[in-house]
Amino acid sequence: MNSVSNSCMHSWKPIKVQLFGRFRVTAANGDEVVINGKRVRALLAILCLQPGEAIEREHISQLLWPGKFRAQARASLRQTLLELKQQLAEVCDDPFSVGREQVTIRAELVNSDLIDLHKALVSGHYESAGLQLQTIGTQTLLEGLDNGQDLGLDFAEYLDTKRAQCESRLLQSVEKVFTETSARDLDYARSCLREAVQLRGQDSKAHEALIRIAVLPFALQPSDESLQLFANGLFEELITTLAQIPQLRVAGRGSARQFASCISAIDTAAKLKVSNLIEGTVRRQGNTIIVHAALLDGGDGCQSWSGRFEGHSDDLFSLQQTLAVTLTEELGRALKRQIKPPPARRRSTINKEAYSLYLQGRALTVRAIGDGVLAKAIELLEAALAIDPKFAACWTALAEAHVYTAVYTPCLDRLGQSQKMAECAKRAIELDPKQGHARSMLGIHRWTENDPLGALDLAFEAYRLEPNNPDVLLRLGSFLLYIGRTSEALPYIQAAVDQDPVNGRNYAMLSVAHLNLGNIDLAIDAGQRMVDLGLPSMWLGVAISATGNRKRAINEYRQTMKLMNKTMFPPAGAKPLSGPALFAFWEVAARGVCSGKTLHRKLYCAVLDRLHGTLHDPCDTSIVQPAIWMGYSGMVFKTLGTQVTPANMFCMMSLWADLEPIKQVRLHQDFLSFAERIGLVAAWERYGWPDLLSPPQQK
């Protein structure tokens, strides 16, 4: 029997798991497959909620056997996995991949109604999505699976979180159908979706179903600048706390920092894509700190609530928690919604001086660009950790400062900075296992070790821990983009952009994702948005070139020269170009990438050959990225195939455009051996092959 099953392994058709309503499993022929045992069913449900994602054994064990010792729980998990495999043996030969520390459901063999719905929304099949939603009706995710809390409070809380996240992402996806300006001929599809949303108890206008808010920096009186650090801390902690509430979408701090209360509330809300704003002032009265906060309607700028809070500057966390709870209650009243108050947050550090240094260092890290900015950030963060070495969030911030140093400065030791980043991220996780962002950055280091599989495992775990953190969302989306899973990557990237819409760096990923999917107009829009926000976007020139408008493409690409030494640095160890040499270089580059002429490409390829032989870093981004755009396969294999760094790894996202001459790299006879050498094949075998690449034939 086993030999027959193994020989036919690749002919199995996917089984279907129903996650909305009553949990049930059906074979490809429609027959129901009975799954016996509440923990066996719960195990399959957990795996199906994260299809294709590696889930830590430790996490599953703690959810399903919280009262057992670690060894007993892991033994119970092994036995339950065996039982599940045996019960599915007649309809699915090997439904999951099992490693020493992780378990992954095989998405190609196990499908679900949740996956079908997600695919329909992402791919633009809105009519199908509406009909699916109507079929689902008012059913919630995994109804009855936690009845009576038979599996314990931990599992019940896990399901509550998953349901809230699923509903929020679902409504966010539906919202885009109603707000997407480029949508055409969708009247029937819109009506289907509107009726479906109504069935689920939400307002018929999908965009009103999500509560999108932004916290603006707190203003100070001119004579009270000594409170700047306190005000910055209140701003940071309020965003972090409110972001934990599933019903809220909080604008990223990077975007919110760029707006002050003196700007029109209506304009600010429009730019941040939010419905409500929280603004306030901080002042001192003797030893008392007084905070005035207000909730504004982003549509008309009117104040719907205001409040006054008092506390001591040494008691920031208590004051922040009180403010967060009150604002949540008032927001719920204003919008007539039931919103759970945010959970109490553990204090990151009890040392005021360490916290002040952390805030200063983190602000410089977010800024990133500028001579000495990141070096100063590292100095401040290290000073904070010298005072409080158990400050987990500060270790995460220091990890980010090191990786930004490798990416945004002419760093002579990028791998050294990556190693330091990894050490800091590991320390943050040791001190606080819920540091999801630290896991995302640790994933960057995995890429430098030719382990994209490990990088994706970390990125998905980070997302599980911090699903509403735009930095975590973007990192997961970018990792999927690097391995060619563009369709899967786009929702995460779009969610990051939606939450942090004035962060220009996010639009690079969005532009490339749309370019890879053939959405040229949307790729151009994202590239232009990046330029409007003051950042160079050579992708804009590449996207315009894909339309055939070569002259305009060359001109747009050439404009990047104006940002040299402002938001871009020359390659590590190289002197900045100036005068005629600068103009000549960018002319050759612009024509080589965008003109479409073989002669211009050959000339720029010769320049890249020279750079490869003379630059301190022969794998520098200034070599790798244009090599991909010009289809210069040999140079791509010599650079990325030699060393992936935090600076050049993002170039891989451009490999997956189905355009000439870019696709010549992917079509090259040595591409698969290159992909195997840098670990891409291992990632594909776990997370699925690229949209534009089929797995090799099984022998």
Image: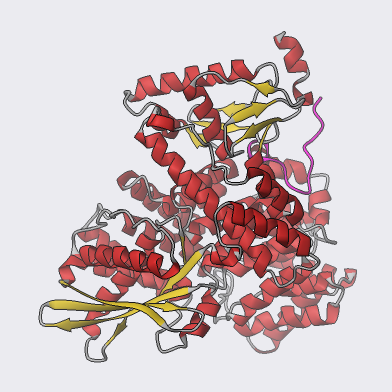
Q: Which span of residues is magenta-colored?
A: 684-699
Identify which residue is drawn at 54% across, 78% down.
Answer: 271
560 or 43, which lies in front? 43
Residue at the far right: name it: 598
Whether residue 318 is visible to the viewer of this picture, yes or no, is yes
32 or 72, which lies in front? 32
For this view, does 540 lie left or right of residue 386?
right
Residue at the far left: name it: 286
For this view, does 145 lie left or right of residue 698?
left
**Residue 344 position in % (x across, y down):** 28, 54
**Residue 172 position in % (x across, y down):** 58, 59
Q: Is residue 166 magenta?
A: no
Residue 517 vertical position relative to residue 554 in the rendered view, above or below: above
Quarter residue 504 falls in: bottom right
- Give the quadrant of the C terminus: top right
Identify which residue is drawn at 31% across, 78% down.
Answer: 306
**Residue 407 position in % (x across, y down):** 53, 64
272 or 577, which lies in front? 272
Residue 693 vertical position relative to residue 213 in the rendered view, above or below: above
Residue 42 vertical position relative to residue 381 in the rendered view, above or below: above
Quarter residue 529 falls in: bottom right
Q: Is residue 688 magenta?
A: yes
- Give the quadrant of the N terminus: top right
Whether residue 652 is visible to the viewer of this picture, yes or no, is no
Identify which residue is drawn at 44% across, 43% down.
Answer: 160
Q: Main secondary structure of the magenta part?
A: loop
Quarter residue 277 falls in: bottom left
610 or 474, which lies in front? 474
Residue at the far top: name it: 1
